[in-house]
Image: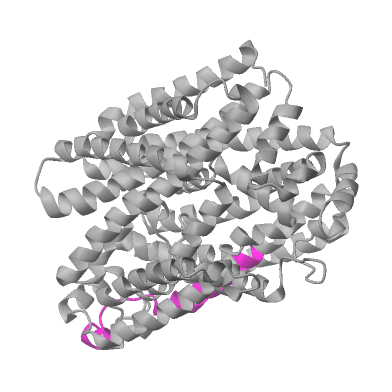
């Protein structure tokens, strides 16, 4: 794909703006560790929420969605759409609790919720585990996707992977280390606008290239496995050879809470918590997370899905390819005119850099706040920790670069993380609302989850033809259920956390008290969330309904099914009205007290 002068001008201008923002915020970021990692808790909701959306919109995401669409049709996206349930629970039940906790990282919560040496060990271990191996996997698949896009669309084999990688990481790493969270968040907003604009433009050009929407519809019906059923939002199980009712129910009922997955952690975690912690107050935290969920599931997917369907009809051989996601950059190469190529490449650089900058900043926050400052140098100056934060960013960047060589496809990396985190989600959800959860239970969940994953893979149970465990989702469910059994046994076999620790957590975070009866009897004066828990739960349910009606309604509009779209939008509007009424009943004063 040849780039003209205008294309290169767009790309260079974007990089100059990104580095300029990094330089502008560099002095502010160097003031303290709180400034560097959580913007001194001063972000408004729309910046924090858009930053969350931009972070989860990486260069890998359109490729992964394209691969799902090509191989499994529209319903293949339930692999990630199902996480909307947990996302809305995070919005209405957990966002305000995280903001009240006033932690800098999610693992810092461990020593707020638990006490003693076991809690200190768990915090340090989980910080290193998330910052290095897990974060490296995420950075690696994002690098892999961007390399794939550049090699298919622009450079071919003219430049080695390592040279391309060095250029990409150097630019992103430089502005991330300079600017801290404020710079990362501001560039995220710019990057999100650029990335969405580019993806929408590509979708329009791609659909036009195959003769328009109706022609695309007809060609999908003739090419896709299952014919026209490939366009169904709710699967037709009789026509879907890969998706059984049991598997579909596992997505909806189990996967969203069973697994820990970056950006969709049960109850919130990782960089989502980092953005919540960066907000001005609990109200901004809730609104930021709500905007993230709506944009993540309703605003972004259809431009990717349309390009995925175009790739299916243009390159039907990809249905049996190891990495069907390659269809996305192939469409870019084939349909983009000169002048638009630079914009689309800039859009993907923006998507790539928004994710990578967050992963670097997030990973460094663990190494500095939860390892270096907690266990090694406890009372240095703010500027000292700010410089250590920049050094930690380099370590994260290099580990991610090294891990890139081991990635074979984006969707396999996704499924690996889902399986590794199976079973831990229940602990993360319940520790806020059940006093009996202890550090030993959380450690047991992590150990059991990883051990069971290794056993299933090493014993070959996942490779047996026709085996229940040959399906990755069933592996995750099996690991999750066995892990829950293990940590419950460990929890009841070990003493609870000390009364002092539990009282401190309860009085600071003030969760609904139905699972805190022993502590509530000691601290009856604490104003908890009892009266707003049920309305919040109902609000989460309505939020999920909004997503699951707007998603198919948008597709119905695109394909000219206006009667269906009108019905779905009517349901969505009714759910939004109910959601507003519930929020009024909860009352912002109850949230920000």
Q: Residue furthest top?
A: 5
Q: Is residue 50 above or below residue 208?
A: below
State the residue at coordinates (43%, 64%).
421
Q: Nearer the viewer, residue 269 or 525?
A: 269
Q: Quadrant of residue 166?
A: top left
Q: Quadrant of the C terminus?
A: bottom left
Q: Nearer the viewer, residue 476 or 107?
A: 476
Q: Quadrant of residue 80?
A: bottom right
State the residue at coordinates (72%, 60%).
75
Magenta stretch prevailing secondary structure: helix
Left or right of 28? Residue 482 is right
State the residue at coordinates (10%, 47%).
377
> Magenta segment: does it hold 539?
yes
Q: Is residue 371 above or below residue 11?
A: below
Q: Which residues are magenta?
A: 519-546
Q: Position of residue 81 (x, y in %)?
A: 62, 60
């Amino acid at each position: 794909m040849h780039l003209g002068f205008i294309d290169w001008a767009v790309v260079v201008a974007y990089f100059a703006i990104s580095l300029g923002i990094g330089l502008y915020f560099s002095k502010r970021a160097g003031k303290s560790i709180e400034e560097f990692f959580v913007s001194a808790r001063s972000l408004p909701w729309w910046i924090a929420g858009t930053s969350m959306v931009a972070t989860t919109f990486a260069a890998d995401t359109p490729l992964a969605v394209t691969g799902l669409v090509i191989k499994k049709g529209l319903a293949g996206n339930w692999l990630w759409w199902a996480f909307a349930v947990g996302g809305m629970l995070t919005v209405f039940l957990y966002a305000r609790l995280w903001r009240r906790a006033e932690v800098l990282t999610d693992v810092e919560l461990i020593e707020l919720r638990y006490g003693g040496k076991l809690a200190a060990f768990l915090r340090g271990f989980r910080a290193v585990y998330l910052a290095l191996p897990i974060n490296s996997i995420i950075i690696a698949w994002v690098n892999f996707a961007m390399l794939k896009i550049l090699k298919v669309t622009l450079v071919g084999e003219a430049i080695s992977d390592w040279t391309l990688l060095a250029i990409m990481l150097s630019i992103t790493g430089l502005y991330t280390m300079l600017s801290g969270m404020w710079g990362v968040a501001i560039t995220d907003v710019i990057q999100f606008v650029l990335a969405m604009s580019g993806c929408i433009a590509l979708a329009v050009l791609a659909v036009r290239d195959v003769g328009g929407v109706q022609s695309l519809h007809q060609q999908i019906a003739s090419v896709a496995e299952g014919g026209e059923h490939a366009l169904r939002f709710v699967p037709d199980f009789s026509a879907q050879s890969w998706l059984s009712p049991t598997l579909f129910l596992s997505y909806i009922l189990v996967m969203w809470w069973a697994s820990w997955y970056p950006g969709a952690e049960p109850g919130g975690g990782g960089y989502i918590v980092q953005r919540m912690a960066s907000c001005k107050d609990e109200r901004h935290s809730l609104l930021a997370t709500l905007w993230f969920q709506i944009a993540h599931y309703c605003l972004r997917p259809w431009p990717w899905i349309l390009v995925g369907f175009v790739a299916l009809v243009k390159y039907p051989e990809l249905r049996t390819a190891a990495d069907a996601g390659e269809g996305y950059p192939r469409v870019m190469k084939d349909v983009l005119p000169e002048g638009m190529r630079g914009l689309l490449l800039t859009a993907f650089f923006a998507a790539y850099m928004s994710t990578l900058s967050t992963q670097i900043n997030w990973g460094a926050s663990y190494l500095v706040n939860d390892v270096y400052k907690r266990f090694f140098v406890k009372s240095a100056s703010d500027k000292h920790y700010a410089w250590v934060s920049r050094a930690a960013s380099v370590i994260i960047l290099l580990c991610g670069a090294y891990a890139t060589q081991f990635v074979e496809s984006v969707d396999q990396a996704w499924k690996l993380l889902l399986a590794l985190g199976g079973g831990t989600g229940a602990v993360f959800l319940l520790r806020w609302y059940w006093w009996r959860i202890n550090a030993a239970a959380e450690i047991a969940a992590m150990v059991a989850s990883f051990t069971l994953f290794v056993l299933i893979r090493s014993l070959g149970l996942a490779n047996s033809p026709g085996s229940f465990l040959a399906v990755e989702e069933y592996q995750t469910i099996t690991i999750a259920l066995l892990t829950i059994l293990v940590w419950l046994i460990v929890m009841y076999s070990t003493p609870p956390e000390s009364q002092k620790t539990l009282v401190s957590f309860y009085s600071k975070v003030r969760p609904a008290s139905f699972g805190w009866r022993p502590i509530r009897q000691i601290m009856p004066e604490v104003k908890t969330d009892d009266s707003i828990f049920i309305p919040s739960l109902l609000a989460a349910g309505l939020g999920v309904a909004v997503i699951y009606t707007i998603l198919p309604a948008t597709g119905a509009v695109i394909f000219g099914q206006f009667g269906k779209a009108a019905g779905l939008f009517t349901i969505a509007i009714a759910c939004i009205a109910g959601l507003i009424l519930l929020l009024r009943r909860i009352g912002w004063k109850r949230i920000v007290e």
